[in-house]
Image: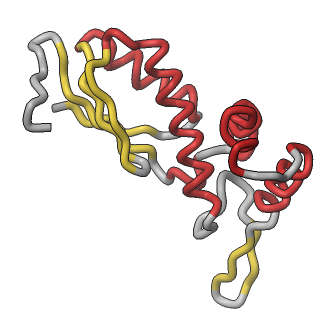
Amino acid sequence: MKNIVVPDTHMMVSFNIVSLFTNVSVSLATNIMRKRWPELFKIWTGVEEDLFFRMLEFCFSSSFLQFEGKTYSQVEGLAMRSPLSPVIADFVLEELFDLVESKFGTDISFMTKYVDDSLFFIHKRIHGPLLNYLVYFLYTNVFMDLF
């Protein structure tokens, strides 16, 4: 990043998705996985599509935790502490980045992500629309830092 120059017309913004796993809806995750099935999963698994998604639904609906001797079921979002959640969340964020790039392409000179944080160099005129787009896509809290 030492060689990256931000033009005067651009700004650096950082976005943080609050509570990423629990704020990624199961329906959004499932829809994205279905959309990406042909390009990704047929390469990596010999499982038929229908069986794969039934297993995925089972994993999504079987999230339980114990606290002070009581058992709870997680009712929203991807399960915390599930080994599947980081992988699924990453697919969701990849889809989001693809959509952001297609919508705002030329106004973004750089973008990268690390888990639930992302960094963009964007034209100053799109910082509001970009934040609104991220919130609309995820239906959740997205914090923005301006630099």
Towards the viewer: 41 or 85: 41
Q: Is residue 124 left or right of residue 137?
A: left
Q: Is residue 63 left or right of residue 117?
A: right
Q: Looking at the rendering, in which quadrant would you find the N terminus?
A: top left
Residue at x 85%, y 57% (from the top left corner): 55
Q: Position of residue 95 (x, y in %)?
A: 56, 31
Q: Nearer the viewer, residue 10 or 91?
A: 91
Front residue of this view, candidates 21 and 2: 2
Res. 35 image quadrant: top right
Residue 88 placed where, x, y %?
62, 50
- The image position of residue 122, as x and y in percent, is 27, 19
Q: Where does residue 30 sit, x and y in percent of width and height?
A: 75, 41
Q: Residue furthest bottom?
A: 69
Q: Relative to 51, is 130 above or below?
A: above
Determine which quarter of the picture holds residue 111. top left
Q: What residue sits 66% from the left and 52% below the top?
A: 77
Tally the numbered discs: 0
Q: Name the quadrant containing residue 140.
A: top right
Whether residue 80 sits left or right of residue 42 in the image: it is left
Q: Is residue 79 above or below residue 113?
A: below
Report the residue at 57% width, 48% height from top: 89
Colour setting: secondary structure
Q: Is residue 95 above or below residue 114?
A: above
The image quadrant where one finds the C terminus is top left
